[in-house]
Structures are given as C-alpha cells and as structure tokens.
Image: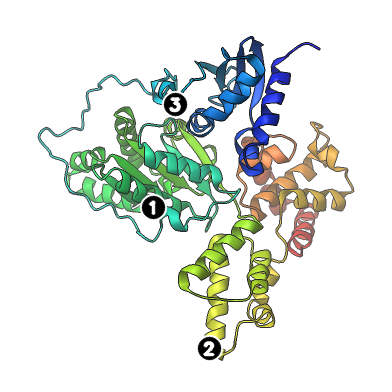
Amino acid sequence: MAITAASVWSKCLEFIKDNISDQAFATWFEPIKAIKLDEPILTIQVPSKFFYEWLEEHYIKLLKVSLQKELGPDAKLVYSIVMDQNLSKADPYTVKIPSSNKEKLKPQELNAPMNIESSKVKNPFVIPGLQKLKIDSQLNINFNFDNFIEGETNRLARSAGKAIAKRPGGTSFNPLFIYGGVGLGKTHLAHAIGLEVKEKHPEKTVLYVDMQKFIQQYAEASRSNNRNDFIHFYQMIDVLIIDDVQFLSGKKGTQDVFFHIFNDLHQRGHQLVLTSDKPPVDIQDMEQRLISRFKWGLSADLQIPEYDLRRSILVHKLEKDGLDIPEEVVDYIAKNVKSNIRELEGALNSLMAQSLLNKKEITLPLAQKALANLVKHHRKEISIDYIQKVVCEYFKIPLEKVQSKTRKRDIVQARQLAMFFAKQYTNASLASIGSQIGKRDHATVLHACKTVKNLSETDKIFKGYVEDLRRKIGAE
C-alpha cells in the first residue's frame, strides 16, 4: 500500500490523540488536513496563522515525535495557512521541526503576507514634542481571566486573548475581533485581556473605551477644534480596546478618523481589540476599507454557552460568594436557563433573593417555583435546525429540498422563511445562518429577510404563513 500524506497524518493523529485530551484534539487537530507528502516533508493545511502559532507554542514536541516516528529523524513539516476562506490559494510556510525548543522558529519571524509593511509612514496627525501621558486604562478589575470560565463555545476567543496578553502586537491576530450576542462575555473578555497585558507588560499603555464614548469624544473635539489632539491621544495607546464597534455604523466622519487611528496603530505594531454584536461582514453602513481591516487578524465568536459551561459558571459564582446550594438546584438552573451568561447569573441572584426574603432554605421545589416564568421562557433552545424542521413540516417539504440549489418558488419561499426566523430567534450571524440553510452567503440571508418583511406587508396569505410559523416556533 502506497504511503500518502493522508495515511501518514492519520498515523500521526492516532499517536497525538493518545497523548492529549479529547477536547484539545477536537479543537486543535481535527480541523487540520494533510495535503501533500514529499518524503520526508509533510504539508498540512491549518485554518489560520493563529492555529500555526498555537501548535508551535503548545504541541511542537508532540508533532515532532509523531512525525519522526512515521518519516524518520529528518522529517519536516510545512504549514499551508489559509488566510481567508474566500481565497482559492493557501499561503505556505515551511517550518523545520526543531530538535530542541531553542531551534523553534518564532511565528513573528515568518514573512507572512498578512503583516502590514513595517516601513515608517509619515503621519500627518503627529504633534511634535507631545509626550506620552499617564493614562487611566478604564478597565474593570472584576472582569479578569480568573473568572472568565472557559468552555467549548468561548475557547478560541479566550485562547486568542491569552496569547495577545502574552505578546500584544506580536501575534497575527491583530486586530482581535470578538463578536456574539448580548450577555455572552464580550466585554468581560476585552477587560480581561487589558488587565493581563497591564500585569505582564506594565510599560504598555492600555485603554478601554466603548464606541459610543469614542463617538462622543470625537464630536466634542471637533466642536472645540481639537481634532488633531484627539487623534494623537489615541495614537499613543499601545493596546487599544474598543467595545461595541458596531455603533460606528452610519457615522461617516467618525469612521474616517477611526480608520486613520487604526492604520497608524496597526502599522506601528500596536494591538487592537474590538468587540461587536455581529461579525464584520454583517455590520451595515460601515466603510468597506474598515470592514476589510477588521478582518485582517482573527475574528472569534462567543456562542450561547453549552450546559457544562453554564454549570461551571454557576459553581464558580457560588464559590466566589461563599454560598452553598444543593447540586440538584445547580443542575436545574444550568439545564433550563440557556440564553446567555447574564440571565444565568440573574436567575441565581433571583433565587438567592427569594430565599432571603421568604427566609426559606434553597431547595429544588423553591427553585422551580421562584424561576417558573424564566424557565418556561427558556424551556427549549430554539435552534436553526429546529426552525428548518418546523418550516419543512408546515409546508410538507423535505429538508433536503430546502437545503438544495433548486429555485422552485415554493422551495425558495420556505427557505427564505427559515432564514427570516433563524435571524429572529437565534444569535447566529447572517453568514452562519446561510451556511446552515443550504450553504448560502450572508447576502442571500439579508435578501431573504427583506423579502419576507415586504411580502408580510403586502400579501395576506403570506402574512398568515408568517404568523402561523411564529406561533409554532415560539411555542417550542
């Protein structure tokens, strides 16, 4: 049997899987593909330069042993790094597997095309002689990594944040763009990154600011003719953290000034961390040059927490507050309050308040009574799969037809309604909805939502479909 790239990598994976946790294996090795073998060189494709850096940082010894076991002591590894899913070609980087950690090639030494040219660019906003000031970071010390509990749904974003705190501006994920729905921990993670940067690099100037505050400051600076001072102030920041960047939408003047600040900081190797309630591609009324820059680094989403993470968050909060409640109550809350971390902690606080006010010990019956309305609301999580199932059953159309490429009117109509309700009832991005409903792009989903809205206002029969489906989906 001929030796192929796939067969060699498969053997390596067998060895690797035996030496790390299932969770780590699923996160960092399952996405990798073996694409070429030219003995003793194996080429593997990884999703991003972040993956390359993480493998080099944490698993280089394991990779070395597994590969040399299959291809001998002269084995070499080539990483083919996919810079963008829309690109047809990958960008390869050859890395010799080191015989010791001292020989390991540092990721920043790679001539990666995503890096901005480091040549000095004359900055028209610089004010000569202005010294860096002592700046209050505006960080909340309660939002740190110690109480940002890790789970499947936030692991990538948290790992990227920890790596940035270790080497701000020195990784390929600059900017780090964190996005997700309300109450999933975006602001907490942003503060945690800033706090750890300050701890590890006290010489760095770190600043956290929400975008609405930034917009307000710029408006005041423009009115008082201090625009240049405003810009130069932000250009002095080593690690700039902007929360809720989606509020920049439609603000043309502020977008322009933020573009210049972003460019200057990035070109000088300063770190940017941005948060948003949606991915860059879904932000409306934003200049394309800014959207493009938001995608230069790593976009990491925070999803609705899974059961294990919800339970861990509750346990951590109880330990922190020195409280002790029955395990069955913790399980009950974790299983029934699913939407976000904020509501999860709110449910626990509500139960504690009920216990104190009524002077009753916390038991499962008390929890069921106190949280009855909240639990009823969250009884079942509405997913995209469930929405597709309801729509298909309503129109008596097979799911595979909705997922297909057919343009038949009744199928297209069902597909558009599924997309419309997925946007209404889930926190998924437009791109994610499109991917799960027939592998469409975000523009198709946006068009579907507009079409459903327009038809609901002009077609009584179609409006009836929408109302029927809303009752069926909402009654889950």
- Pick the front one: 196 or 391: 196
Image position of 214 with respect to 406: above or below: below
Q: Residue at x 60, y 57 (%)?
A: 309
Image position of 388 with respect to 407: above or below: below
Amino acid type of the residue that numbered disc 3 sits on in the rendered structure? Asn
Q: Is mark 3 on a helix, strand or loop?
A: helix
Label 2 crowd bin: few (<14), some (14–19), many (20+), radius 10 Å:
few
Find residue 79 and report its horizontal and vertical position in percent.
Answer: 55, 20
- Pick the front one: 447 or 202: 202
Amino acid type of the residue that numbered disc 2 sits on in the rendered structure? Leu
Find residue 130 and report its horizontal and vertical position in percent.
Answer: 12, 38
Label 1 crowd bin: few (<14), some (14–19), many (20+), radius 10 Å:
many
The residues bearing labels 1 and 2 have C-alpha atoms spaced at a distance of 34 Å
Residue position marked by numbered label 3 in the rendering = 101
Amino acid type of the residue that numbered disc 1 sits on in the rendered structure? His
Q: What element carries label 1?
A: helix
Q: Are marks 1 and 2 in contact (CB under 8 Å)?
A: no
Residue position marked by numbered label 2 in the rendering = 357
**What colour scheme has been applied to the protein in the rendered image?**
rainbow
The residues bearing labels 2 and 3 have C-alpha atoms spaced at a distance of 60 Å
- Pick the front one: 154 or 388: 154
- Left or right placement of residue 394 versus residue 244 in this view: right
Furthest-bottom residue in view? 359
Q: Is mark 2 on a helix, strand or loop?
A: helix
Q: Could you say which quadrant of the image residue 31 lies in? A: top right
Of mark 2 and mark 3, the one earlier in the sequence is: 3
Of mark 1 and mark 3, the one earlier in the sequence is: 3
Residue position marked by numbered label 1 in the rendering = 191
Furthest-left residue in view? 129
- Left or right placement of residue 434 versus residue 201 in this view: right
